Image (spheres, rainbow, N blue to C red):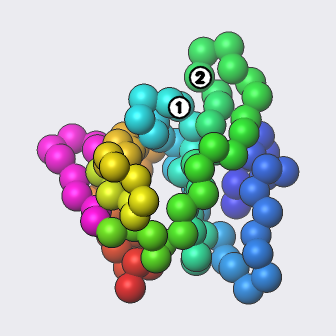
């Protein structure tokens, strides 16, 4: 189940399943990480006075080349075609749980 603010933004492809959504910061931008059976979506918004939500990233799991984590609640994602790693700070789920979900769907 998606929060109502982002439900209308996320459209699943045929055969794709929703795995969950998690409050987070992606490279210091507040939003939601939406995990499906095929991809990771980042829905930006909800920070400060920002009530508008937009889909800013769509990353197929096959494009994630490396997942690492640091102490605390930070996951780093290395995505093909990008020269740097995305920094994903979780807000409402442990970094270990999110990392395990991502790793299980990369294969």
Residue 30 is labelled as 1
**Which SS class for mark 1?**
strand
Q: Position of residue 91 (x, y in %)?
A: 43, 39
Q: Position of residue 29 (x, y in %)?
A: 50, 30
Compared across the picture, whether 74 is left or right of 98 comes to left
Report the number of discs: 2
Please state the extent of the stretch shown in magenta in the rendering: 66-75
Report which quarter residue 78 is drawn in.
bottom left
Which residue is identified by label 2?
47
Compared across the picture, whether 16 is left or right of 20 comes to right
Q: Residue drawn at (70%, 60%), measured in percent from left and top?
A: 1
Q: Residue drawn at (28%, 62%), measured in percent from left and top?
A: 67
- Determine whether 103 is above or below 2 in the image: below
Q: Residue drawn at (74%, 24%), measured in percent from left and top?
A: 51
Compared across the picture, whether 10 is left or right of 91 comes to right
Q: Are marks 1 and 2 in contact (CB under 8 Å)?
A: yes
**Which SS class for mark 2?**
loop
Is residue 74 on the magenta stretch?
A: yes
Compared across the picture, whether 16 is left or right of 48 comes to right
Distance CA(mark 1)–CA(mark 2) = 6 Å
Residue 11 visible? The answer is: yes
- Determine whether 24 is above or below 29 in the image: below
Q: Position of residue 39 (x, y in %)?
A: 56, 68
Crowd tier of the residue under label 2, counting other residues whose Cα lies within 10 Å: few below 14, some 14–19, many 20 or above:
few
Between 101 and 66, the one lying in front of the other is 66
Q: Residue drawn at (64%, 28%), measured in percent from left and top?
A: 46
Crowd tier of the residue under label 1, counting other residues whose Cα lies within 10 Å: few below 14, some 14–19, many 20 or above:
many
Q: Position of residue 16 (x, y in %)?
A: 69, 79
Residue 55 is labelled as none
Check the image and name the residue furthest to the right.
8
Report which quarter residue 107 is drawn in.
bottom left
């Amino acid at each position: 189940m998606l929060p109502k603010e982002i439900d209308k933004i996320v459209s699943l492809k045929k055969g794709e399943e929703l795995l969950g959504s998690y409050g987070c910061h992606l490279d210091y931008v507040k939003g939601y990480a939406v995990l499906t059976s095929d991809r990771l979506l980042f829905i930006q918004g909800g920070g400060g006075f920002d009530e508008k939500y937009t889909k800013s990233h769509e990353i197929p799991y096959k494009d994630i080349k490396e997942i690492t984590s640091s102490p605390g609640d930070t996951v780093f994602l290395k995505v093909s075609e990008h020269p740097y790693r995305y920094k994903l700070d979780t807000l409402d789920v442990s970094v270990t749980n999110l990392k395990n979900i991502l790793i299980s769907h990369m294969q």
